[in-house]
Image (cartoon, helix red, strand yellow):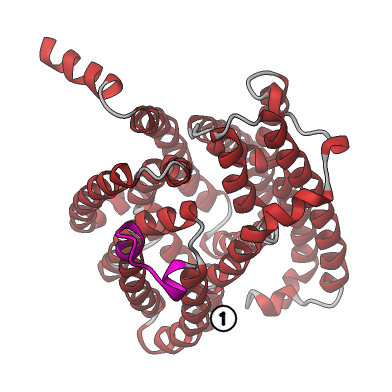
Amino acid sequence: MTRLVHLVRNFFSDGHERTLKARKNVVYSLLFKGLAMALALLNVPLAIHYVNSTQYGIWLTLSSLFTWFSMFDIGFGNGLKNKLTEALSKRDIKLARAYISTTYAAVTVISILLFAIFLIINFFLDWTAVLNVPHAMKGELSLIVVIIFSVFSVQFILQLINIVSQSKQNTIIPALISVTGNLAGLILLLIFTHNTQGSLLNLCLTIGVTPVLTLAVFSVILFKGTFKDLAPSFRLADRHYIREIMNLGIKFFIIQIGLIFYYNCDNLIITQVMGPAAVTPYNLSIKYFSVISLFSNILMTPFWAAFIEASVRKDHEWIKGTVRHLEKICLGLFAVSLLMVALSPFVYRLWLGTEVTVPLSLSACVAVYTSLNTYRTIFNFYMNGAGKIMLQLYLVIFSGIGNILLGIYLCRRLGVEGVLLSTILFCLVSAVFEIIQYRKLINNTATGLWNK
């Protein structure tokens, strides 16, 4: 027992200051995000039971479509993360607050414009055709998409509080926001389940609105308290800072657009080729292996800001050592994912009962995809922090377009697994180039595109 206490104490006290901060973030974030994921998993069987597999598949497809909207900040989010972290590393609070204020003002304007454009486009869209569902649902879907897009428009602005927290190398706060939102959603879903008939509209309100309300509450509390010295003010917003934020941010934006095609088109492809019911087992397998993604996200997120700070201070030895440790952890996560594949039939029966069947082959594909993506994140976060993202930009565009074309073809030939096999192939190709670029950058041998 004494030895265990000694090991825990050393874990939080021995090492580089930057490493210790990351360790604390990882441990506390693991606690809160683990709880958030557990609540999200509890939501799944409740939601499917409240509506049905097809309606739940419709919700999943709609939410993935509107998640694309969160990427249309034209790169302001990631641009802010890099510029704000640099300002905080130099302890320039005045500049940091100006960056935050400018970003909030710009994103608010973008959100209003996009919402206006959506209302115009929505007037001409037939969502029953987009989602491949009966025409009788047209009226209900028209109302639902307007509500969901309204919610995402507000979330688009409020989620900047997570960027501010991460720039201060604090990932505990976003994790706490997540667990609070998921708990509120679960409570509301339980209330609906016991007091109303199954309704796709109620389900969308339950899962969509609670995270936004949580973000609003936390934003007020944090900017009145812990982040008071960074609180945004429209009078501090200055268009001259937009160029600084957007210089790198626009590249991130193009990458985000590519990622829409790279990762977020799967639901739509499956819906169009196989119908919305087929989306449900695909997403449930993704949720099951989100245990790996969760740990990876918790582990990697603090290092984006840490890599920025280390790059500013040219601490290359710390970067090399950190990457080696992260690679070892990713290898361990791959072993865990293989065990999860073996246990998946039992876990699905325990979790979902007999309402949905998830093939073992689908679980195996998701395991490979998740593990490969986890490993790539190490190098992507380093490149993002160092601001060397041009190669990543080209890879994402190429892979995004290729993934749609190959994904449709393989989905028709192999089913849902075919969509994942397409994504895995392009992930593997991208990983090779990303690792080469990292080696060149860290050894100061990068030239041309490798150094942009």
Q: Is residue 349 left or right of residue 186?
A: left
Per the image, the residue denoted by label 1 is 272
Depth check: 149 or 220 in front?
A: 220
Is 225 contained in the magenta span?
no
Write the residue at 60% across / 65% down: 251
- Quarter of the image holding residue 358? bottom left
Asked if residue 283 shows in the view, the reply is: yes
Depth order, front residue of 248/7: 248
Q: Residue 9: image x %, image y %? A: 24, 16
In the image, taking residue 101 as reference, residue 353 lies left or right, namely: left
Rendered position, 228 above or below 138: above
- Secondary element type, mark 1: helix
Residue extending furthest toward the top: 2
x, y percentage for residue 413?
A: 38, 89
Residue 216 drawn at (x, y percent): 72, 33
232 up-or-down from 269: above or below: above
Q: Which residues are magenta?
A: 439-451
Question: What residue sits 57% from the left and 33% below the top?
Answer: 90
Is 174 placed above or below 364 here? above
For the stretch drawn in magenta, the main secondary structure is helix
Binning the other alpha carbons within 10 Å of mark 1 as few (below 14), some (14 to 19) or many (20 upward) gives some
Q: Is residue 5 left or right of residue 96?
A: left
Looking at this view, is 431 or 362 the one in front?
A: 431
Closer to the camera in the image, 327 or 174: 327
Identify the residue at horizontal 65%, vertical 64% (top origin). 250
The count of marks equals: 1
Task: Tell me the amino acid under the disc marked 1.
Answer: Gln
Tell me the quarter of the image containing the N terminus.
Answer: top left
Q: Let me know if residue 355 appears in the view.
A: no
Q: Is residue 444 magenta?
A: yes
Query: x%, y% of residue 368?
Result: 28, 65
At horizontal 44% and vertical 47% (from top left) the residue drawn is 311
